[in-house]
Image (cartoon, rainbow, N blue to C red):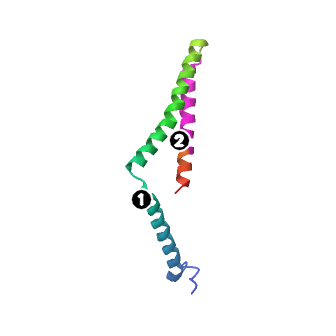
Amino acid sequence: MSGDPKNGPSGEEKLPHAIEKKVKRHLKARREENRSVWFGLGMFGMVGWSVAVPTLLGIALGWWLDKKYPGPPSWTLTFLFAGVALGCYNAWQWIKKESRHD
């Protein structure tokens, strides 16, 4: 029983797709059943540290360069922004990798 091209697939053709979608959702929920609040807090902490560490390292490097080579460009601000950018990239990559496991 083919659906009308104007109206899309018939109800009979939609049923297998709807069942497949529900089964996938059920299996995903079963896999994630073991994840607790601690998993969420751990992920939140990991993302925070992946941004904080490069930011702090950038500040330290910039501060050292400002002491060693004083001048008009503020190395501290430059490396602060570079550290934040690198940290955000790290966090994005880590979250992308974790979301593939689902």
Give me the disc on residue 33: 1
Percent x, y of residue 25: 47, 65
Percent x, y of residue 17: 52, 74
Using the rendered view, name the quadrant where residue 94 is placed.
Answer: top right
Percent x, y of residue 8: 55, 78
Q: Residue furthest bottom?
A: 1
Q: Is the magenta stretch mostly helix, strand or loop?
A: helix
Q: What residue type is labelled 1?
A: Glu
Q: Which residue is drawn at 49% across and 32% down?
A: 52
Q: Is residue 82 magenta?
A: yes
Disc 2 secondary structure class: helix
| Tag 1–tag 2 contact (CB < 8 Å) | no
The range drawn in magenta is 73-93
Q: Residue at x 54, y 31 (%)?
A: 54
Disc 1 secondary structure class: helix
Of residues 79 and 52, the one nearer the viewer is 52
Q: Does the magenta stretch include residue 71?
A: no
Q: Which residue is drawn at 51% across and 72% down?
A: 20
Give me the disc on residue 20: none
Reply above or below: 8 against 75: below
On-image quarter of the N terminus: bottom right
Give me the disc on residue 91: 2
From this viewpoint, is residue 70 visible? no
Reply above or below: 83 against 65: below
**Gap between marks 1 and 2 measured at Cα:** 24 Å
